[in-house]
Amino acid sequence: MEIKNKFKDLRKQANLTQTELAKKAGVGLRFVREVEQGKKTMRMDKVNRVLSLFGYHLEAVKDEKE
């Protein structure tokens, strides 16, 4: 699942508007809108700040080679 879809799904499940989510996570409304619109670059600390509200986080994981 793409991050933009995960953000939107989690926000809607919590019955939050973009404005409410931004305020609750301590990020700007513009950031939330850009993520949900599929912006290709974003600050991972902000992404994790929002995801942490829902018990999620992103991290770098080494790929397993066969």
Image: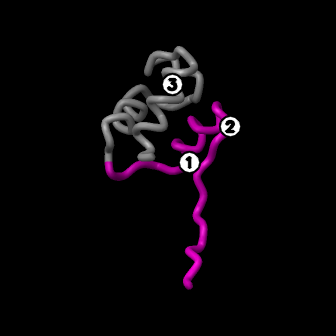
Looking at the image, which residue is at 65% across and 38% down? Answer: 52
Label 2 residue SS: loop
The quarter of the picture where residue 29 lies is: top left
52 within the magenta span: yes
* Residue 62 x %, y %: 59, 73
Q: Marks 3 and 1, Cα distance to the nearest angstrom?
A: 18 Å
Point out the stretch of residues depicted in magenta: 40-66
Label 1 residue SS: helix
In this view, the residue in front, 35 or 45, is 35
The correct choice, above or below, for 59 with respect to 28 in the image is below
Mark 1 and mark 2 lie on one chain; the one further toward the N terminus is 1
Looking at the image, which residue is at 64% across and 32% down? Answer: 54
Label 3 residue SS: helix
Number of the label disc, if any, that sits on residue 63 = none
> Which residue lies under the disc numbered 3?
11
> Which residue lies under the disc numbered 2?
55
Say whether residue 18 is left or right of residue 10: left
Q: Tags 3 and 1 in contact by the CB under 8 Å rule?
A: no
Q: Name the amino acid, label 1.
A: Asp
> Which residue lies under the disc numbered 1?
45
Q: Name the amino acid, label 3.
A: Arg
Q: Name the amino acid, label 2.
A: Gly
Q: Marks 3 and 2, Cα distance to the nearest angstrom?
A: 13 Å
Query: Depth-wise, is mark 1 or mark 2 nearer the camera?
Result: 2
Mark 3 and mark 1 lie on one chain; the one further toward the N terminus is 3
